[in-house]
Amino acid sequence: MKKLLLASAIAGLSVGLTTPTMAAEDNYEQYQAAIDQRGDSGVSGTAIFIPQNGEMTVKLNVENADGMSAGLHKGICRYAEDSDGAPDLLAFDEDPLFELSAVDGNESSTTIELSAEGLMGDPQSVAIHDGSSIVACGNIQ
């Protein structure tokens, strides 16, 4: 019984990375991911993914990132600095699948050609870049 409870608790924790929410006025789902600082960068925030008509609007609200670039990447943040030995599906690709608009103040908004199924398919992450360094990253799934 204890093993079943532990397995249920672990499964519940792993689901919490991406949180779907409903937008009542348009009746479509939105997906949200936390963007966590890497090192002591002080950069963190939230990414909201809004699918509509086969496209995806990506809205970032990020603190301490004015003027920094952002991208949607294949793979997960854990392997952002070093994907050697990472499973192929999880390895972080330094070249973004989609470049997102630079952060202006604390915000960025970009519409890309990506469906909800494409977003939630293979593991992906959103990264904030200061030059060639990743200063914040958030797993989408």
Image (cartoon, rainbow, N blue to C red):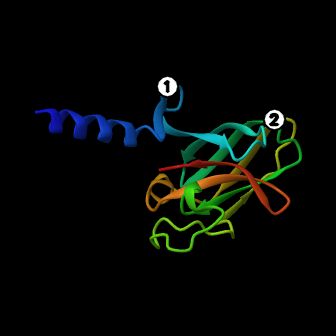
Kind of element beneath mark 1: loop
- The residue furthest top is 24
Give the residue type that dot 2 points to.
Answer: Asn
At x 47% / y 41%, what residue is drawn? Answer: 17
| Position of residue 117 in the picture relative to residue 137 (left or right) | left
Position of residue 38 measured from the top left corner of the image (x, y, whole percent): 69, 47
Position of residue 126 measured from the top left corner of the image (x, y, whole percent): 64, 52
Q: Which mark is residue 45?
A: none
At x 16% / y 39%, what residue is drawn? Answer: 3
Q: Earlier in the sequence, mark 1 or mark 2?
A: 1
73, 37: nearer the viewer: 37
Q: Vertically, is 80 above or below 108?
A: below
| Position of residue 11 in the picture relative to residue 85 (left or right) | left
At x 29% / y 34%, what residue is drawn? Answer: 9
Q: Vertically, is 116 above or below 89?
A: above
Q: Residues within 10 Å of mark 1 (few under 14, many from 20)?
A: few
Distance in Å between CA atoms under marks 1 and 2: 26 Å
Position of residue 82 measured from the top left corner of the image (x, y, whole percent): 62, 67
| Position of residue 88 in the picture relative to residue 48 (left or right) | left
132, 2: nearer the viewer: 2
61, 53: nearer the viewer: 61
Which callout, 1 or 2, points to the residue nearer the camera? 2
Give the residue type that dot 1 points to.
Answer: Ala
Q: Residues within 10 Å of mark 2 (few under 14, many from 20)?
A: some
- Circle 1 sits on which residue? 24
- The residue furthest left is 1
Quadrant including the N terminus = top left
- Circle 2 sits on which residue? 106
Q: Vertically, is 58 above or below 119?
A: above
Which image quadrant for residue 99?
Answer: bottom right
